[in-house]
Amino acid sequence: MAGRGGVNGGKWDGKIPPECMPNRSILRLSAQLRWEEAHDPLHSDIDVRKICGVGPGMPFANELLIRANGSRIGVVGLVPCAVGGTRISQWAKGSRLYNHLVRRASESVKEGGTIRAVLWYQGESDTVEREDAEAYKGNMERFILDLRSDLQIPSLLIVQVAIASGEGRYIDVVREAQIGLHLPNVKCVDAKGLRLKADNLHLTTMSQVHLGIKLARAFLALSNHAYVTWD
């Protein structure tokens, strides 16, 4: 979710596709817990140990506004929490990453607003060891149930991405776990087929855009919005 689109040789090229352009109706919660106009790289002050570029967050939010078809959708607030190169076990309840996510999510609605969904794109690091890959489904189910409980949103929508690549050879095992996750209000969007960068791990800039649009359409399909219409 942090996005490595346009990142090569340890630098981001700074190129922003039209689908990722800033909009006054799209805000992000900064690392200092302040709302500001969102722009790529969304995770520059969150995933600080890696170089961030274009991710699926901005095209997701822009697609929501486009699909509103002139209706009053209000403001889309994005709450970046992703940290690249992490296993699902590192997001277990009580861990630093989990606590950070819950804290940011809780802070985001203290002055109003509603948490509508969690976008989850993770799993490449779980493809290295068979033990991690085989434990993925159980770990993800526990993560979702714990998160819903701690945020006090029992039916919180989770839109997760089935990975298209991985750091190890157990990609299919993790993918099967993600696609086979059958909890209420959990939708899987498949990244397979989207173009990868030369590292065969991260999505290209335009693939990040396509993924963001797919996430938005999945979200809208599962949300009770009167303004949703389809072409």
Image (cartoon, helix red, strand yellow):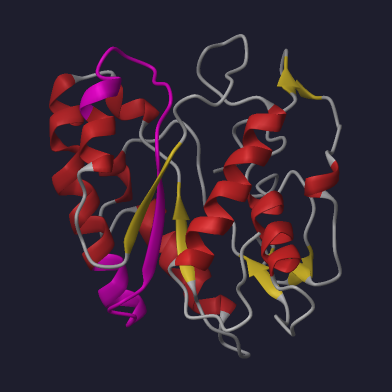
In-image side of 82 versus 60 (left or right) = left
How many labels sit on residues? 0
Front residue of this view, candidates 56 and 42: 56
In-image side of 182 versus 207 (left or right) = left
Q: Is residue 117 visible?
A: yes
- Is 66 located above or below residue 204 in the figure? below
Question: Residue 56: x and y, percent?
Answer: 62, 45
Q: What residue lies at 84% left-to-right and 25% top-to-bottom?
A: 13
Q: What residue lies at 49% left-to-right and 74% top-to-bottom?
A: 116
Residue 227 on the magenta segment: no
In-image side of 170 versus 42 (left or right) = left
In the picture, the quarter occupied by the N terminus is: top right
Residue 157 on the magenta segment: yes
Q: What residue lies at 45% left-to-right and 30% top-to-bottom?
A: 85
Question: Residue 143: x and y, percent?
Answer: 26, 57
In-image side of 116 versus 47 (left or right) = left
Residue at the farthest top position: 198
Q: Is residue 2 visible?
A: no
In the picture, the quarter occupied by the C terminus is: bottom right
- Is 36 located above or below residue 212 in the figure? below
Q: Which residues are magenta?
A: 146-173
Question: Residue 19: x and y, percent?
Answer: 79, 47
Which quadrant of the figure has residue 33? bottom right
Which quadrant of the figure has residue 137? top left
Question: Residue 130: x and y, percent?
Answer: 16, 20
- Is 191 located above or below residue 80 in the figure? above
Q: What residue lies at 36% left-to-right and 73% top-to-bottom?
A: 156
